[in-house]
C-alpha cells in the first residue's frame, strides 16, 4: 500500500517508515574499509618494529661509547631517519646524535674533565659486538666549566670582558688578589692555549706574577674525546668554554680516547 510522505519532505527523497530496514554498506565500500584498515595495521606494525630496531641500535652505540670513554652514566643516543631497518640492512646509520655528561679526567694525560660532550656522527657503522663503533665523519662540542678549568690551572678562571678572553685571579695572604686577562685559543695536539696576557685588577707583584705566568703558560690537553677528533676552535661563555672538534673516519672503543 502506498504510504504518504510526511509534510515538508522533498519530493523524490527516499523515505523510510517505521518498518524500514537499514542495510550495511555495499560490498565495494566494505572491501575498501578492510583494505584501508589492513594497510594502517601494517604501517603501525612496521613503525613499531622499526622503533624497536632503532632502540637497539641506540643502546649498542651508547654502550660502546660508555666503554670507550669511561663515563659513569650511559650517554643518550638518538638515531635519525626512517626506516632504521633499511639503514641497518645497509650496515650504516645515516646520522646519530649523542650526548654524554661528566667525562672524567685522570690527572695525567687528561687533566681536565669534560662537563658535557655532544656528538653528531654521520655514516656510523657498528661491529658485531658492542665494544666498537666507527663513523665516517664527526662534529662534536665539549663544554668545559670554569670550575674544572680553575682546578686544573690552580688559579680562579672566569669569563673575561672581551670575546674569547678569560680572567685569571690569584691571591696571597696580606697581599690580596690580582687578576689578569688572557685570550683563549685552540692549539695543536687538541690543547687550549692562553695568550696575550694583560694586567688587570690589583698590583702584579713578582710572587703573584710567577703564579699566574706558570698557570697560563700551560697548554691544557683535551684528550678525553674519541680518538680521531681534532680541536678546531674554542669559545668562551658565561659558565665555561666550548671546544669544537671535527674528524673523519673516527673509531671509539675501550680506551680509545685521544692521547
Image (cartoon, rainbow, N blue to C red):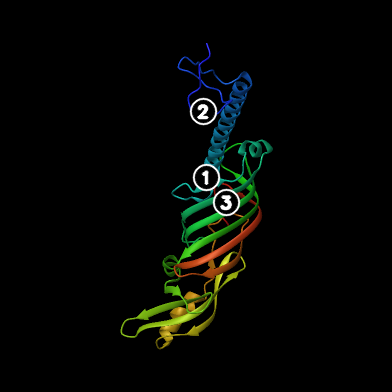
In this orientation, does residue 259 appear?
Answer: no
Q: Nearer the viewer, mark 3 or mark 1?
A: 1
Are the residues flagged by discs 3 and 1 in contact, CB closer than 8 Å? no
| Crowd class of label 3 (few under 14; some 14 to 19; many from 20; radius 10 Å) | many
Q: Which residue is mark 2?
A: 9
Q: Secondary structure at mark 1?
A: helix
Question: Going 61% across and 44% down the picture, which residue do you hit?
Answer: 81
Residue 63 x, y percent position in the rendering:
51, 43
Q: Nearer the viewer, mark 2 or mark 1?
A: 2
Can you tell which mark lies on residue 62? 1
Mark-to-mark CA distance, 3 and 1: 15 Å
Is 206 in front, or is 141? 141
Is 112 in front, or is 164? 164
Q: Secondary structure at mark 2?
A: loop
Quadrant housing residue 93: top right
Can you tell which mark lies on residue 7? none
Q: Which residue is mark 3?
A: 256
Question: Going 45% across and 79% down the picture, which residue do you hit?
Answer: 212
Amino acid at each position: 500500500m502506498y504510504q504518504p510522505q510526511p509534510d515538508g519532505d522533498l519530493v523524490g527523497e527516499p523515505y523510510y517508515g517505521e518498518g524500514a530496514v537499514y542495510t550495511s554498506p555495499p560490498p565495494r565500500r566494505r572491501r575498501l574499509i578492510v583494505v584501508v584498515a589492513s594497510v594502517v595495521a601494517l604501517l603501525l606494525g612496521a613503525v613499531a618494529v622499526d622503533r624497536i630496531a632503532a632502540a637497539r641500535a641506540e643502546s649498542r652505540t651508547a654502550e660502546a661509547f660508555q666503554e670507550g670513554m669511561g663515563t659513569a652514566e650511559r650517554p643518550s643516543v638518538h638515531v635519525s631517519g626512517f626506516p632504521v631497518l633499511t639503514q641497518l640492512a645497509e650496515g650504516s646509520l645515516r646520522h646519530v646524535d649523542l650526548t654524554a655528561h661528566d667525562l672524567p679526567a685522570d690527572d695525567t694525560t687528561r687533566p681536565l674533565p669534560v662537563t658535557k660532550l655532544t656528538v653528531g656522527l654521520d655514516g656510523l657503522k657498528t661491529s658485531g659486538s658492542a665494544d666498537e663503533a666507527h663513523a665516517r665523519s664527526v662534529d662534536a662540542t665539549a663544554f668545559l666549566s670554569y670550575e674544572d678549568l680553575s682546578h686544573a690551572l690552580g688559579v680562579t678562571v672566569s669569563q673575561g670582558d672581551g670575546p674569547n678572553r678569560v680572567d685569571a685571579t690569584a691571591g696571597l695572604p696580606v697581599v690580596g688578589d690580582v687578576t689578569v686577562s688572557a685570550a683563549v685559543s685552540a692549539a695543536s695536539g687538541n690543547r687550549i692555549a692562553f695568550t696575550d696576557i694583560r694586567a688587570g685588577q690589583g698590583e702584579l707583584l713578582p710572587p703573584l706574577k710567577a703564579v699566574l705566568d706558570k698557570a697560563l703558560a700551560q697548554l691544557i690537553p683535551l684528550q678525553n674525546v674519541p680518538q680521531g677528533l681534532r680541536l678546531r676552535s674554542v669559545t668562551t661563555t658565561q659558565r665555561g668554554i666550548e671546544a669544537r672538534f671535527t674528524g673523519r673516519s673516527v673509531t671509539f672503543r675501550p680506551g680509545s680516547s685521544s692521547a
